[in-house]
Amino acid sequence: MRRSRPAEEAGGLTLHRTLGAGEVVRSGTLSPYRRLVGGPGEAHVVREDLAAAASDAPARRRSLLAFAHVTDLQLADVQSPGRFEYCNRHVEDPRFRHLVPMHRPQEALGARAVQAMVETLNSVPHGPVQGGDVELVLTTGDAVDNAQWNEVRMFLALLEGGQVRPGSGGPRYEGVQSLTWGDDSYWRPDGSPQPGDWYQRRHAFPYLPGLLEQALEEFDSRGLRLPWLACFGNHEVLVQGVGRVTDAVQEALVGGSKATGAPVDLDLETLHEQFIEAPERFLTGHRHPVTADPDRRCVTRQEFVDAHFSALARPLGHGFTAANRLAGTAYYAYDAGPVRFISLDTTRRAGASHGSLDEDQLRWLGDRLEEVHSRHLRADGTTVRTGHDDRLVVVFSHHGLDTMTNLGVLPGAPDEPRLAGGGELRDLLHRFGNVVAWVNGHTHRNRVTPRPDPLGRTGGFWEIASSALMDWPCQARLVELLDNGDGTLSLACTMIDHEGLVQPDPRASRSGSWLAGLHRELAANEPWRGVEAGSRGRVTDRNVDLRLPAPFPVGGRGTVSP
């Protein structure tokens, strides 16, 4: 697929850089603003970490199922009183390392980027490797940024179809990027070119008057034509994906003032713990008036699940079940063709951004895996024959193996059941040989990792983490599950760009495609998560053909008997 990239990474293409008026490039003093250029799609790299490819396999291949993966949309109410953008001023202080960045220059354009990706996914009917029909879209959490009801409504309107309202509060933009905020720490596109704000002085960000008003205008979305499955992430239920929602936070969210800086009595040595336990402590400094909005209220996990049962939902609930609605849970199994998709809820409501599973969900997962295995292994290594039909299994969740580390006792947390981390979940999956992939997000980075069974009892699985749509490179991933015809399977992965303009001309009309393209360009230039952050991953993390042993003879497209 076509991809966008900084011009200096585009081989023999012309280098494009822009500098602010009067600026001089000196080492360590100015980072040039990068423009993007279109480039050809990368070739697929065959990875044989888990199984070697037969020389004649491509001619005998057939598609079993294809799906798209999109993650970490992080649709943000950029005017919310419950955000803590001022933390970015302390980005170089290691004591703030768990709390930054809390503001991105491109956030106000996030809904337009999601809309552009929806249109792209609607226009990609087949996988590019073997031509199989793309049958559904997996989302893997952090669809919203701050656990707010208006953000959830924005997300559902974009993916289901309907009127999208990116703004909130009053009729005009009232956030930290406005000129009336009086703080040049943020990119202010309405500001004067000289002397400019920090982004314009240090990184040569453009001067685009009227941009924020246009970015927050309401617009209509046609929604995804494909069925899509939901997933629950830490930003769906925690303040900025980290802190617990308290009564004081709820009151601040729907109120009429917003913090402009950190209070003087914060203990800088325990910032992370304080933010987990009582985020409202960070809202007690100097305040700026804003328009109150009751739709900014926080949502519970149960309300988030309930919202997916609309008349436009396809499938109904987007994977969530009636049992989820009754129990207030957010994990489920969904069967499509020869594949069982299992969505896990890896978020810990007690706080902190990383994940874990509670004991009840771990037990539930074992039961759902057993249902689609004719045989599996007990913990002691003995084989159990079940009499069930076999299906291939794709697990998906927000967190992956290396970020399921949220197991300790958190400050002020109520008593919780025993928690399982990535190692315990990995060991369970290795007992069920039909698991072929674990798809996730959270890290905002493309990374593909083989997970072989260390005891050699099963063929292992591939862990596929995709980068965030909110952050550079602002892409989604297509995955084609292929039968290679030689006793192996492939997960053929292809990165795709959305349809936003690759190089938006500041003089052009600001259409939705223009705004989406600017979002991507700003994301590329964002100082902490832009092109230099390595979020694209290596070439072996992007367009890849991931081989693994077929766990059983794969027959037709339905449920397959051993």
Image: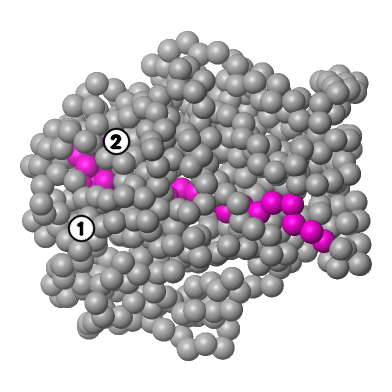
**How many neighbours does mark 2 have within 10 angstroms: few (below 14), some (14-19), or many (20 or more)?**
many
Q: Residue at x 34, y 77 (%)?
A: 504
Using residue 143 as the reference point, say whether residue 539 is left or right of it: right
Q: Which mark is residue 163?
A: none
Name which residue lies at 48% across and 42% down: 314
Q: Answer left or right for 231 relative to 61.
A: left
Secondary element at image label 1: loop
Label 1 belongs to which residue? 217
Q: Does the magenta-highlighted stretch encompass residue 139?
A: no
Residue drawn at (66%, 18%) of the image: 363
Place of residue 366 in the rendered image (x, y in percent of width and height, measured from the top left): 71, 23
Q: Nearer the viewer, residue 303 or 96?
A: 303
Q: CA distance from mark 2 to mark 1?
A: 18 Å
* Location of residue 382 in the rendering, given as x and y in whole percent from the top left corner: 90, 21
Q: Is residue 398 above or below residue 72?
A: above
Q: Which residues are magenta?
A: 61-90
- Residue appearing at x 18%, y 26% in the figure: 251
Secondary structure state at the residue bearing disc 2: helix
Q: Disc 2 designates what residue?
A: 149
Residue 83 coordinates in the image, percent (x, y): 26, 41
Q: Are marks 2 and 1 in contact (CB under 8 Å)?
A: no
Q: Give the residue type that dot 1 points to.
A: Glu
Q: Quadrant of residue 425?
A: top right
- Judge left or right: residue 524 versus residue 372: left
Q: Is residue 441 above or below residue 348?
A: below
What's the residue type where badge 2 is placed? Trp
- Judge from the rendering whether residue 492 lies leftward or rightward of residue 517; answer left or right: right
Q: Is residue 546 visible?
A: no
Could you tell me if residue 362 is visible in this image? yes
